[in-house]
Amino acid sequence: MTREELEKLRQRIVSERDPDAPCITVCAGTGCLASGARKVIAAFDQKIDAQGLEVDLGFRSTGCHGFCEKGPIVIIDPEEICYLQVTPDDIPEIIEKTIKEKEVIERLLYVDQNTGEKAVHESDIPFYRHQERMVFGANRRIDPKSFEDYLAIGGYEALVKALFEMTPEQVVSEVKNANLRGRGGGGFPAGVKWEIARNAPSETKYVVVNCDEGDPGAYMDRSLMEGNPYGVLEGLTIGAYAIGAHEGYVYIRQEYPLALENLTSAIEDAENRGLLGTDILGSGFNFQVRVHRGAGAFVCGEETALLISLEGEVGEPRPRPPYPAEKGLWGKPTNINNVETWANIPLIIHRGSAAFASIGTEGSKGTKIFSLVGKIANTGLVEVPMGISLRDVVYKIGGGIPGGKKFKAVQTGGPSGGCIPEERLDLEVDFDELTKAGSMMGSGGMIVMDEETCMVDVARYFIDFLTDESCGKCVPCREGLRQMHRILSKITEGRGEESDFEILEELAETAREASLCALGKTAPNPFLSTFRYFREEYEAHIREKKCPALSCRKLVSYYIEPEKCKACLICLKECPAGAIDGAKKTIHIIDQEKCDACGICFEVCPSRFEAVMKISGEPVPPPIPEDQRVVIRKIKQQ
Amino acid sequence: MNDDRIDQIIDNHHGEASSLIQVLLEIQRENHWLPKEALTRVSEKLEVPLRRIQHIATFYRAFSLSPKGRHEVHLCMGTACHVRGAGRVLEKVESETGIKPGETDLDLKFSLETVNCLGCCALGPVMEIDGTTHGRLSAADTTDVLKSYE
């Protein structure tokens, strides 16, 4: 395909599409699929087929829309009516009422938990209203397997511009001027990296997409790759042209089957259309892309480890310098960026660096996609301009903490990030501010924690994760983390001592100073940041043997309040330890000797009774005498 | 898994030693584990020492050097699931199946693995069995889910 043919195809597609024609869009991202989107799609297919509606009614299943909490999501265009938590049973009604009669089905709309107001359109929902979806917004408008869809929204315009109207140097300087910083964690300016790779003297160079998204609680790269693979490929091709590479690799986790499938399909299609391969669009530029599946090792998200893994070896990081931009894959200059960074490139080239840099803060330009998860009402992927306050993300977009619980902290930056407490909620989110607060941007995970989350346990959890994922090359990381984990576990079990703080700080300092790669250098962060902001929680564990969040099992006891117990037998039957004593019409008692504090009784006790109590740091009240345990008698007394 | 199929997989990757991980991944996907005979065959064909293959097969999480059960249980221990109580779900799975993460029961019914994130954080705690996601689990629900597998 030549440049002219591409433009002709685009014009034809756009002219054939009636923007006012009805179209149903179903989100088929991983989150919605897990909530049952596949059945919803099948039900639509069947209904549309049975009624012969294919001709007049558009239908599209797309990648992730971001509002995973309320999936499966269905949107009816052109009105943009947004239905949430749709089930297959709703489909006939949607077709009959909304499609045919233009009538809105009230019960499928978003309801604001605070005001009770309903929102008909996607853009009226607070979760979407406060976002700026420059990069991620395309997901909702394209079928990831449809080249036509991508073309219709302006796809490949940036590549045409780069190949025919710009020199490689101009592309590099455009990315530099945009001040796009790497979205994978480091935040290193992409343009600077490109320039180094561009200037490195070598015939052979490589470009690589890092889609080894390993941070627990972060899935924006996966959603971009699943939902808009052509966008990532377009960015990669522009990058290859800019630095002078003719071969590219996509390193993708094998745990992401759908992303892999959509990417592979997009690569094949782009090859067939002459958008990859030799003489792309008749420009004379050659570029081919290969896919490499990652076999599951967190450390391979680190760029040097990833490149070694690409070569088919055990992915252990190596010292930098030399940086991959000078000496990377098979010793050749290699430019490696993560998925979200690549996905920003077409935008920068198409709209220009000035437009891109007009969004964001002084040091961090553009938007960032965060995965807002944990104890938050609206879980999902959100794209916001750099500089938005954390408070706006948590409350305006996220809808606050569910269940009337109190906010405690938000953890950013993945396992080696840090926790930010309530008093810092007005912090403007960007690379530098997060680092100043003792955390980091990382790949964009934002895990919200409420009063029931124990910060010592959180630190223990992350250190445990990192101990497991440490490749073992450097002693301070391999052994130091192991010791930190041991001490933190001891504290959560109520066996901590005052002197532990000093040892923890020493181990943290050593790992930070003496590890080779970012994994080890930042690994102590979860401890350091929680210790900085939540020291009193650590002290309570050690001095009072108390877990203020009532979360650490060894420090928590369960107790049934005799006044509230209705002798319903539920907890008694569910208790795996057989620690609950009681009978019909006899108040239940927990035998503290047998109880292993699993908390199942607390979970199953009906909310109208709330008889099971959690206690920490204080003695459990003695059980009431056996002769007072009959429920009937107690009611009569009252 | 017979040698012909292994040769075929290797040929698909043009017999390049650098594609070792990709070859092992495909054997793992089809066979669900990596038997010693298969590794020996790969070692001969790609001319890579068995020692290096062992190193790779034990370094990356995707590979298993022992047979897997009929149902592969992946329990998400990602941060979002952790703060929503995945630890208690794990305990329940362990007590119901009698196996710990990384193990397979004697009847070859369940294999249990913990994973770092399944990317379904909105549904946490999440457990995936044979590719089907079970979300918003409580320890009490877990028993019923496991019982539904034969």
Image: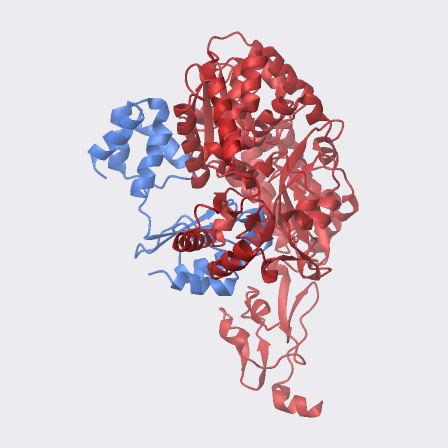
Chain colours: A red, B blue
Q: Is A314 or A263 nearer to us in this picture?
A: A263
Vertical relation: A315 (above or below) A620: above
**Residue visible at 58% across and 79% down in the picture:** A588
- From the top left corner, tell me how far across and down residue A6 is, in percent: 48, 23
Residue A326 seen in the current view:
no
**Residue visible at 48% across and 64% down in the picture:** B141
- From the top left corner, tell me how far across and down residue A159 is, in percent: 54, 21
- From the top left corner, tell me how far across and down residue A154 is, in percent: 56, 29
Q: Is A413 or A391 nearer to us in this picture?
A: A391
Vertical relation: A617 (above or below) A584: above
- Which of the 4 image quarters holds residue A566? bottom right
- A365 sits left or right of A371 in the view: right
Q: Is B81 or A268 nearer to us in this picture?
A: A268
Quarter the N terminus of chain A occupies = top left
- A130 sits left or right of B35 in the view: right
The total of numbered circles placed on residues is: 0
- From the top left corner, tell me how far across and down residue A220 is, in percent: 57, 39
